[in-house]
Structure formats: C-alpha cells, structure tokens
Image: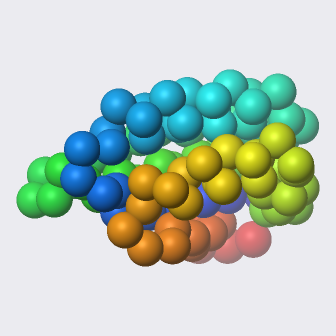
Amino acid sequence: MAVKILIKRILKEGTLKRASELLIRARSAAMEEPGYISSETLRGCDNPNEIVVISMWERKIDWENFREKPARREILDEFAEILESPPMYASYNLGLYS
C-alpha cells in the first residue's frame, strides 16, 4: 500500500536558497530509488521559513531504505546547518484500510 511521508523543517532566516538546493539534491536522489512515486514541497503561508515535503512511496519500507542511505544522510548533515530545529517526520497510509 502506498504511503506518504511528511517532513517538516523550520529554516533559519535567509537560508531559503540553500534549502532549495538541498531539496533538489534530495529529490533527485529519491527519484532513483525503488518504490519512489512522487513528491511536492510546500512553503508556509504564515511562516515562510516553514517547509513541508510530502513524498509518496509504494511501501513504507522503500522510504525507510532510502532514509538510511549514506547519500541522503550527507544531505541531512548539510540541512542541519540551516535548520532552527530538527526536522519532524510523519508517515501515513493512503486510505483508511490496509
């Protein structure tokens, strides 16, 4: 069953351009992974430094495998430098029944 993964990040002031570069790298890496379907990026209306990425994967294990890849971890280390706080993650099944 497909899942959606939400990642919420609060950026430090003035780091949107750098965040955009990192998000492009992360998305490019995800697109090469088994189970990746799609993703979108949202920017907060009330807080423009709040970014939410919603990605869709065929299975949660596909996401978990990608999450632990060294290339992704490298991007996360770079992201840590521009975040106000650690990112928040949540995963959701599509629909009410599995």
Q: Position of residue 53 (x, y in %)?
A: 48, 49
Residue situated furthest left in the rendering? 46
Residue 28 image position (x, y, % from top left): 68, 26
Pick the front one: 78 or 96: 78
Q: What colour-coding does the image apply?
A: rainbow
Q: Is residue 8 left or right of residue 25?
A: left
Residue placed most toward the observer, 39 or 17: 17
The residue that appears at 60% across and 48% down in the rendered structure is 78
Residue 48, position as x, y percentages in the image: 18, 50
Quarter of the view holding residue 10: bottom left
What residue sits 89% from the left and 37% below the top? Answer: 34
Q: Nearer the viewer, residue 24 or 42?
A: 24
Query: As displayed, is residue 28 above or below residue 18?
Result: above
Residue 6 seen in this snapshot = no
82 vs 61, left or right, is: left
> Can residue 87 be seen from the camera position used here?
yes
The residue drawn where x is 88% and y is 50% is 69
Farthest residue toward the front? 81
In depth, the one of 94 and 92 nearer the eye is 92
Location of the C terminus (image quadrant): bottom right
Report which quarter residue 83 is drawn in: bottom left
Where is residue 40? Give x, y as percent. 46, 38
* Quadrant (top left/top right/bottom left/bottom right) for the N terminus: bottom right
Q: Residue 9 lies in what quarter of the image?
A: bottom left
Q: Residue at x 37, y 68 (%)?
A: 84
Query: Considering only vertical position in the picture, is 95 above or below 65?
Result: below
